[in-house]
Image: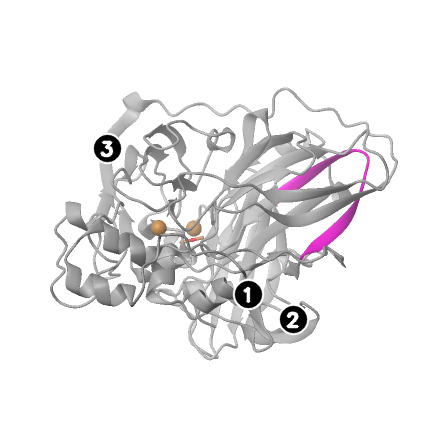
Amino acid sequence: MKRRSFLKMSGLSLGSAITSGSAIGLIATSGCKKDFRMGLMTVPVPVSEGNFSKPLSYPIQAGSNFTITAQSTTANLKGANIPVLGYQPKSLLGPSFKINKGETVNILLQNNLSEHTNIHWHGLKIPALMDGHPDQLANAGGTFRYQFTVNQRAGLSWYHPHPHEHTGKQVFQGLAGLFIINDAEEASLNLPSDQYELPLIIQDKRITENGITYNPTMEEIMAGYMGDSILVNGIYSPFTNVSTRFYRLRILNGSNARIYNLALSNYADMVIIGNDGGLLNKPSAVKEILIAPGERLDVLVNFAGITIGTEIFLLSKEFSNGGSAQGKQEFKIMKFKVSNNVMDTFSLPTNLSSIASVPTSSVVKTRTFEISNAMEHHGYPMNNGMQMRHRINGILFDSNRIDVGVSANTNEIWVFDNSAGDEPHPMHLHGVFFQVIQRNGGRASLIASETGWKDTVLVMEGERVSVIVPFENNKGKYVFHCHNLEHEDDGMMLQYQLS
Ligand code: C2O
Ligand code: CU
Ligand code: CU
């Protein structure tokens, strides 16, 4: 179904963003007028909520020796068995790896797809040849063995395919999974665990009886590909029963492009205790929090004192600065049904960890990356066909070109400049964690989840965000890119060489 007729059927107005006729045609003949570009990029994909009657479940857990098989399979979605991609038969997603700091993992990827794939371990500091660089592929029918030692603090990382120009499709159709690292520091806090620790992979999909469709139009490449159905752990519109106590929600935004502004329907606090790189120094209570594709949140939620039978929803609220396709609608993601009275002995610690700020005086180099993609400011060639591509510093990904040379064991400041841009870009670096030091323009400040260590940072329209990156010693070639997977596949990805 075409976007325009879909919107009509949903009874929503297109607003003024889109003009009649072919927006692409307009661009091709119009020169670089921003108005026309806006017209091309910009329709939200409305979410249609289900009835929250299907129980939430969780991916199986796996340890350090495991074979995962990328395959075409089926999953039960919206009451029908439909074709999807998975890392195991009969479901979306793959196992959640649970690994202790210091362990060596040995994971064999068996590629039973009809095209190449690979696995990027998003949030792991591992050797370049194990990182799932787009050059390091398992051909159709082939394998790739991932072996590495996990030498980093506890946190929620994840994994997904990274074959250039196919990442968006393979992730959207079902390939992704969690990688949870435990360590003694985290264990000593006695955070809610077992049935009180809920991993939640939030994704939007387009579900038809023929499968999860992925066929982005030019305008959907510009905005990112979004779905109308919200899944948690591969389940559409789920609910879970909860007890009257603290829960630990470990949230991944595994969507291609959709940003969520998470909140609880009872306006209760969400206590942010961790992010991409593990625990923060201190808990921080918020009423709503943004999470962009690729980002993770570690959140404590307290259901104590709530009447049995109460239903509370995890929502995505409206938000601003998200360009013309994001943040326009509030919708429900999943339901918590308070169903069991228990005594809770957990009390929220005042300190979680002690992360020192990387001193700016240690920085050897500051680099600025222009990510606005505002063509009128950069004189990109507009005269030979369709030039609406997402770039960094005006250039497209080329795996034969090193864009940035970095010296091992040095600290740098990287600035992502979207000040002239009009869409959000979650920027992600492979192989490192960084600290966010400043945001100018747009929201003009850091949010609660932007202390501590990050590997992905959201740069909204009009924003300029600086991060300080301690590069370590895993020498080799790594990519960095926008984690809007359509932007990434479109070429909004460069490479740094650590040497
Ligand atoms: Cu999760 Cu290169 O990305
Ligand atoms: Cu990554
Ligand atoms: Cu982007």
Quadrant housing residue 461: top left
Q: Is residue 171 above or below residue 421?
A: below
Q: Quadrant of the C terminus?
A: top left
Q: Nearer the viewer, residue 185 or 337?
A: 337
Q: Residue at x 41, y 41 (%)?
A: 458
Reply yes or no: does residue 34 show up in magenta: no
Disc 1 marks which amino acid?
Gly
* Residue denoted by label 1: 174
1 and 3 marks in contact (CB < 8 Å): no
Is ligand 3 within 8 Å of the beta carbon of the residue shown at mark 3? no
Label located before the other in sequence (2 or 3): 2
Is ligand 1 within 8 Å of the beta carbon of the residue shown at mark 2? no
Helix, strand or loop at label 2? It is strand
Helix, strand or loop at label 3? It is strand
Disc 2 marks which amino acid?
Ala
Label located before the other in sequence (2 or 1): 2
Label located before the other in sequence (1 or 3): 1
From the top left corner, tell me how far across and down residue 171 is, in percent.
Answer: 49, 63
2 and 1 marks in contact (CB < 8 Å): yes
2 and 3 marks in contact (CB < 8 Å): no
Q: Which segment is the magenta one? A: 237-250
Q: Nearer the viewer, residue 153 or 397?
A: 397
* Residue denoted by label 3: 366
Q: Residue at x 24, y 40 (%)?
A: 420
The numbered mark at residue 75 is: 2
Badge 1: how crowded within 10 Å, few (<14), some, or many (20+)?
Answer: many
Disc 3 marks which amino acid?
Thr
Q: Is residue 413 above or below residue 112?
A: above
Q: CA distance from mark 2 to mark 1?
A: 10 Å
Numbered label tally: 3
The label nearer to you, 1 versus 3, is 1
